[in-house]
Structures are given as structure tokens and as C-alpha cells.
Image: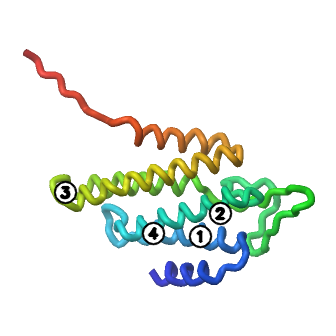
Amino acid sequence: MEQVKTLEKLLAVAVTTYQRIRVILALISARFDYNPSATHMPIDIWSSAQKEFDQLVLILVQEPEYSVQEVVAEEYDESLERIPKTESGEIVRIRGSVISFIDRLDDEFTRSLQNIDPHGTEYIERLRDEKSLYQSICRAQCYFEASNQENPLARVITRRLEHIYSKVSFSIKAH
């Protein structure tokens, strides 16, 4: 938690877009790594990670000269400040994985539902978070479409479809 608090302070004083992106990537990862419960991520930590994810995607959509990608082809030194070259239209590629954040948010949401009493009010409250999760998935889809990242786009569309269609289990009774 101390590392998370330090990263939150860094995010508040980050000046450049590159600094904000790097700090948000580290902050979301730190939130996922901190898990005092063995069953599922605490809801308040999950909500914070989801808000920061939305902030990250918003930055990436508003500033298309920056792109977060799992594989960065060129030589990559994480300590360097990166600024896009406006005259050549070059994109600054930052090593990270937006799709893995979506996967983890979605998986942690499902895990929390599995570990909460379905007859309690906490379960109903938790179900309300699916709307904001779905919106985050849609935002990620927009980002992947705009940045022409086909593999993550296919994965995020699959996640989106899983939330659209209900998963009803039918039981057939013999007469």
C-alpha cells in the first residue's frame, strides 16, 4: 500500500503525458499486485484500478501520438523521457499491456461475485459495477480500433460479447 500511495503522489505531480502514462501503468499494476485477500481483490481497490484504467485509455485516445503496446520493436530504455516528433508524425510506443488490464479487471469482477453471498445486498451492489466495467471495455475497444491493434481488439470484443449475452444454464427434466 505504501508503494500505491507513492505512485498516487507521483501521478498528482506528473507534468508530461509520458510521465502520466508511465505512472498510471505502474499504479494499476501495483493495485493488482496488492491483494490481502486470497479469494478476490477488495472492491475499493478494484474500483480505483478501474478508474485509473479509464484515465489511461482517455489519455491514449486523446493523444494518439502515444501508444501502449506489449511488444515495442525499437530499443527501449524505460528511464528516457519520450516526446513524439510532431514533424514526422512518429508515435511514441510505451511498453505495457492495456488488454491485460481489461482481462484482470474482468476476472477480478467475476471472482468477487463468486465469493460474495448471492443472497446478500453486497452482491446486488457489486452487480452494479458491471455497467462501469462494460464501459471500460468499450473504451478499450475504441482505443484498439484507433491504434490498429488487431490482437487486443479481438480479445476485448470477446470480453464485451461475454457481458452482452447472458449465460443461462438450462436443465432438462425427464418426464
Q: Position of residue 124 (x, y in %)?
A: 24, 56
For badge 1, the amino acid type reads Ile
Question: Which residue is rendered at x = 35% and y = 66% of the image?
Answer: 43
At label 4, counting other C-alpha atoms closer than 10 Å, the crowd grade (few under 14, some 14-19, many 20 or more) is: some
Closer to viewer: mark 3 or mark 4:
4
Q: Position of residue 45 (x, y in %)?
A: 41, 70
- The outermost residue toward the right is 87
- The answer to whether residue 161 is left or right of residue 96 is left
For badge 4, the amino acid type reads Ser
Q: Are marks 1 and 2 in contact (CB under 8 Å)?
A: yes
Helix, strand or loop for disc 3: loop
Q: CA distance from mark 4 to mark 2?
A: 17 Å
Q: Which residue has dot 4 on it? A: 48
Q: CA distance from mark 1 to mark 2?
A: 10 Å
Q: CA distance from mark 3 to mark 4?
A: 23 Å
Q: Tell me: residue 100, above or below residue 43.
A: above
Question: Which residue is rendered at x = 66% and y = 44% of the image?
Answer: 145
For badge 3, the amino acid type reads Asp
Q: CA distance from mark 1 to mark 4?
A: 11 Å
Q: Which residue has dot 3 on it? A: 117
